[in-house]
Image: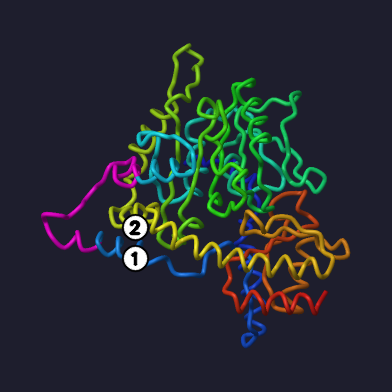
Amino acid sequence: MAKLNENYLNLKESYLFSEIAHRVDKYISIHPDTKIIRLGIGDVTLPIGSTMIDALHEGVDAMTSSSTFKGYGPERGYDFVRNSIVEYYKRNGVSIEADEIFISDGAKSDTGNITDLFDKDNIVMVPDPVYPVYVDTNTMDGRNIIYIDANADNQFLPMPDSNVHADIIYLCSPNNPTGATYNKEQLKTWVDYALANNSIILFDAAYEAFITDEALPRSIFSIDGAKKCAIEFCSLSKTAGFTGIRCGYTIVPKALTVTASTGALMSLNAMWNRRQSTKFNGVSYIVQKGAAAAFSEKGMQQSRQNIKYYQENAKIIANCLAKKNVRFFGGVNSPYIWFECPNEMESWAFFDYLLENVQVVGTPGAGFGKNGQNFFRLTSFGNRENTIEAMERIENLL
């Protein structure tokens, strides 16, 4: 008889966004002619820039000739795309090396798959509220997870407690779901904690391109000492609108080493390379052509136009909430607006309330943890007309 991984029994019955889809589909089946406005899942709506489109076409055209055809590529990614990321980081004041970069099909995959490198006995620290993937993937592995409170009192930016030990720490900045962003001093405190505790920080920088405040760090590697204790994940999904194309990358510094129980010094860069070469066949050449173009200065200029559009949407949402005296966080250096449910409503009740009364879909904060029980997330990734209409509906309702 096959024995299953019974840690799956400890997972919630359904993934957060699957439950949202279920409730929306049920409502639509009863009200098929109603216009639903979705400001929930963080999927982009604008097309990617012409620079990336042209590069993708070049990649396709290469497949038409035996002289340019590409089959299996390097598991780490082609040099041309990794070098383009090195240059992108350099423009942002951060020095990394090409052989520290691993191209993947997205940050979601890598933040889950990175757990392959760590023993199940590690203590994992995550903030609450938190992106569910961090919790669920470690639950699947049977790890002990401890939570630190992110709340309105600390602006949803929890700091380490020297009396609490964790081996692996998940940080996301700008944060999903709250939109909060750590400053350099706060991240330095986390790096110092990790170095003192021999911990590893798993830093999700998927939304770094939304940072407009130049004083805020866009990479944990802008912090002294971080290359000895941190791995960074990033994605082109929000940076360049690649949600349907699928491309991201993980940076594992060569300076990041851990002493094994045998006394051997183990390189996490080498371990991740071994893991990827065993379980992953790399991202397609076509997609990587588009990714390299996305990191070019021209590509970034085009992507920033899209980001600016989403940032204007965020202002529309924020202005509505401010007008109704609803307390909110995020929306400035982040595409997410995290706000307190009116009249102390619980978030799933508020979800149903919005759906039933104004047909607007957001994301209940409870799906991100207990500290989200009375909070709600809206995203700025809708089109302008729908965003305006949604907020007009909400303003009239509240």
Is 73 included in the stretch rendered in magenta?
yes
Q: Residue at x 70, y 68 (%)?
A: 317
Query: At label 2, which amino acid type do we have?
Result: Gly
First to last magenta residue range: 60-83
Q: Residue at x 51, y 49 (%)?
A: 108
Q: Report the residue that reaches farthest toward the left.
A: 67
| Residue 362 image point, x, y percent | 68, 66
Is 106 included in the stretch rendered in magenta?
no
Query: At label 1, which amino acid type do we have?
Result: Ile
Mark 2 closeness class: few <14, some 14–19, many ≥20 residues within 10 Å: many
In this picture, is 361 found above or below 90? below
Q: Is residue 38 left or right of residue 94?
A: right
Badge 2 marks a residue whose secondary structure is helix
Q: Residue at x 45, y 33 (%)?
A: 252
Quarter in which the C terminus is drawn = bottom right
Dividing the picture into quadrants, the one containing residue 99 is: top left
Q: Is residue 315 left or right of residue 212?
A: right
Q: Are the residues tagged 1 and 2 within 8 Å (C-beta)?
A: yes
Q: Give the number of the disc on residue 53.
A: 1
Q: Is residue 212 left or right of residue 253?
A: right
Q: Give the number of the disc on residue 290.
A: 2
Q: Residue at x 67, y 71 (%)?
A: 361
**Nearer-N-terminus badge (1/2):** 1
